[in-house]
Image: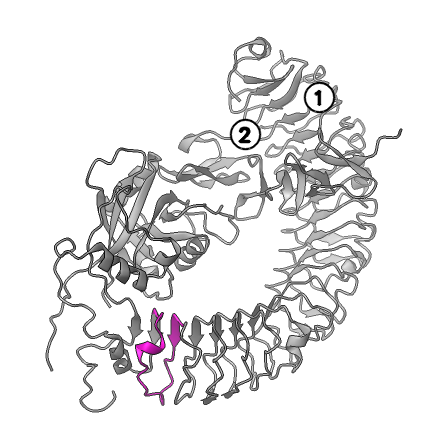
Amino acid sequence: RPALRAVIKVALLNHEPTGKPITLEGVFVGGSAGYAEGKLMQYHPLSLCNTSEDERQENDFITIVKLEHRVPRCLPLLDKARMALDKGAQAVIFDVSDDANAAAELRDTDSLPRPVVLVEAEHAEELMGLVNKNEEAKVRIDILVEPPRWPHYDV
Amino acid sequence: IQDRQGPAALLCPSPCQCEEDGIFVMVDCSELGLSAVPTNLSPLTTYLDLSMNNISEIQPRAFHRLHLLSELRISGNQLRYISGHALQGLHNLKVLMLQNNQLERLPDDAPWDLPNLLSLRLDANLLSEVPAGAFRGVRSLRHLWLDDNSLTEIPVTALDSLPSLQAMTLALNQITHIPDYAFTNLSALVVLHLHNNQIQSMGARCFEGLYSLETLDLNYNDLQEFPVAIRTLSKLQELGFHNNNIKAIPERAFVGNPQLQTIHFYENPIQFVGKSAFQFLPKLHTLSLNGATQIQEFPDLKGTTSLEILTLTRAGLSALPVDLCEQLPRLRVLELSYNQIEDLPSFYHCSALQEIGLQHNQIRRIESSTFRQLTSLRALDLSWNMIEWIHLDAFASLHSLIKLDLTENRLISVPVAGLGGLTHLKLRGNTELYEAFSPDYFPRMRVIEMPYAYQCCVYGSCDSYKPVSQWDTEQSTDEDLHKRTVAMYPIHADTHYDPDLEEFQLEIEESKLQTSVQCTPTPGPFRPCDSLLGSW
Amino acid sequence: SGVSSGCQQGGCLTCSDYNGCLSCKPRFFMHLERIGMKQIGVCMTSCPPGFYGTRSPERNTCTKCRSECDSCFNKNFCTRCRAGFYLHLGKCQENCPEGLVRSDTQRECVPRCPV
């Protein structure tokens, strides 16, 4: 089943509305394709573990985690995603630029209640660049629909 | 602490940073590469941080004028030994942090004289023993950290000098045995951490005298027997002995601990559990037992009425007591997978149940009374059983049910009454189940697994990818999009989706939102929806 | 205390630009510090106020004390209460048990002063 692609619209909150928001793309994980919006909030790869008590955020937020292959996983990525969603995240974005196994680990999953998106390369760099400068941003995630790869046939 | 101008600046030893606290001074000299304690410290200093420097020794009388010092931090240096004279004059000291140094021994005949000390951190050093007289000068001590050292024994005699001690950690050492009367003078001790040692044995009276103990942590040791010495701990609330080598939990194991709220003992090769082991624990809310293969009978939980989570998996249970729910009225999670259970009682009185796990058992029938009135039940896992028949009303009252797993059973039909709220339904492996369930039965479905691909066609899986134009081209009214969005994603109903988007910087984009029900196995070129030769 | 900023910290073993410290030197505590929308790893010899340290062979971590607690020994044992709460045997309460009175300076339940 082809993974659905995500369109990610990013608007900076502390800047005057200067027109077009930043538009990026990612890939939805398993059956989690859907719509979400919220403030971008970074979580360290060592957070979202059974032992780590990640504080609850008040308003709607979207979790972003830059995964690092050097950091041993305290939990499988699917459990980390679920934990983030359980803690109130409207969606989860994993930057997998530096963690080649992440995408494979999340491929066959179906029971995620809200969107989980993988981003990499220039899309990830744009997002993490905002985080690094602590630029408060509102993010909207939606489904990017593409024409099917195999034509509709008539038996 | 910032570098402040004014009186504090006059008394501030360079290159430290100081801050006034009324007439007093708080001095931060951390991470400055210092190799000795600054000499010109003000007598009005109440807080002094020397952590993360290169101090290898404390010169005599370094603090002799600091009678008002309340907190002294010298962690993260290279100190090997601190004599009693080095800390002279600190009459008012309450907190002393010496962790992350290389302390090899403590003074014995001329110990530190700190009459008001409350907290002493000696963790992460190289102490292999604590001399008998080490704590004679700190009798008011309440909190003691000795974890992550090289102790091979409990410092019994030294601890006798600490009648006010309330919390202590001896974790991450090499202690192998706890002798009788090891803590006999610690009547005020509330917390005792002994995890990550090599404790193999304990005296039957080793915890005598610990009348106030509430938390005992024996995790990650090498205990061969159940710690019967806990019998004297009448105030115990939290007990941990997971990751040990204990094979049996005896009858009436916790008879002396009526206040117990949590017991963690996973990762033990427990084979036998006394039937009365967990009786009369009115405050216990979680009990989990995994892999105790010798358990043939369900434990008698008389008097353990607050249990909310019960996990008893991979044992030898073949039946459940009829009065299970009368004993456990507050049960929220019941996990009994990997047993040999055949018949189910009625869970009628377990009205708080939210999750039931009965997968990998030998259940054949589900009666109308089995799950009746479980209005809070959200997840029911009956996969990998032998269920042939389910009463028409079996799920009728399960108004909160969102996940139902019936994978790998022998069903020929499934009653849908009561299943309108499902988001996840799994029926794979029921090879005699041919019915194609109409989507109308499951308006909130997100993930559904069917025995055959053609049963997914009712979910439009064949033409879910309509050739549509790119993301921005087609227009449709906001109202139309809002209606479809709310219908498709109930979260919008919770977040008060506001169609008036002016104050928001993103312009609304028309998007072809497609059905997101994920039905498997997915029909495809070789498993068409228009069945030619009957079912595949 | 015991903290420097960014990757040059004394206790940091491995580090990344976006996540700060990824692992600490032996015996240091890893604290996940929240600064606005960022969360970075910081290595320290003692956890910041409001957090307690837990040592284990694999990793030492900082965990938040209960909300009514300014500093604590572990999750269930407080060593100093927040203003408005009073310490007794590791618990922060708004009132003191029989025979003890509230001391606002020490934020503790203390014996009644003899008349």
Q: Quick one: quadrant of the C terminus of chain B?
A: bottom left
For residue B439: magenta? yes
Left of B94 or right of it: where is A8?
Answer: left
> Which of the 4 image quarters holds residue B55?
top right
Chain identifier of the residue bearing label 2 in the image: C
Q: Position of residue C21 (x, y in %)?
A: 43, 38
Residue drawn 59% across the image and 78% down it: B347
Query: Hey, what amino acid is under mark 2?
Result: Ser
Query: Hey, what amino acid is under mark 1?
Result: Ala
User: Would residue A97 be seen by someone viewing this image from the given angle?
Assistant: no
Q: Is residue C48 above or below residue B222?
A: above
Q: Position of residue B186 (x, y in %)?
A: 80, 44
Residue drawn 48% across the image and 79% down it: B382
Chain identifier of the residue bearing label 1 in the image: B
Q: Are marks 2 and 1 on the same chain?
A: no
How far apart, in angstroms, are the residues tagged by discs 2 and 1? 23 Å
Which residue range is magenta in the image? B422-446
For residue B276: magenta? no
Q: Which residue is mark 1?
A: B86
Q: Position of residue B383 (x, y in %)?
A: 45, 79
Q: Which residue is mark 2?
A: C1
Tell which of B291 and B311 is nearer to you. Answer: B311
Q: Residues within 10 Å of mark 2 (few under 14, many from 20)?
A: some
Q: Is residue B390 above or below residue B151?
A: below
Q: Residues within 10 Å of mark 1 (few under 14, many from 20)?
A: some
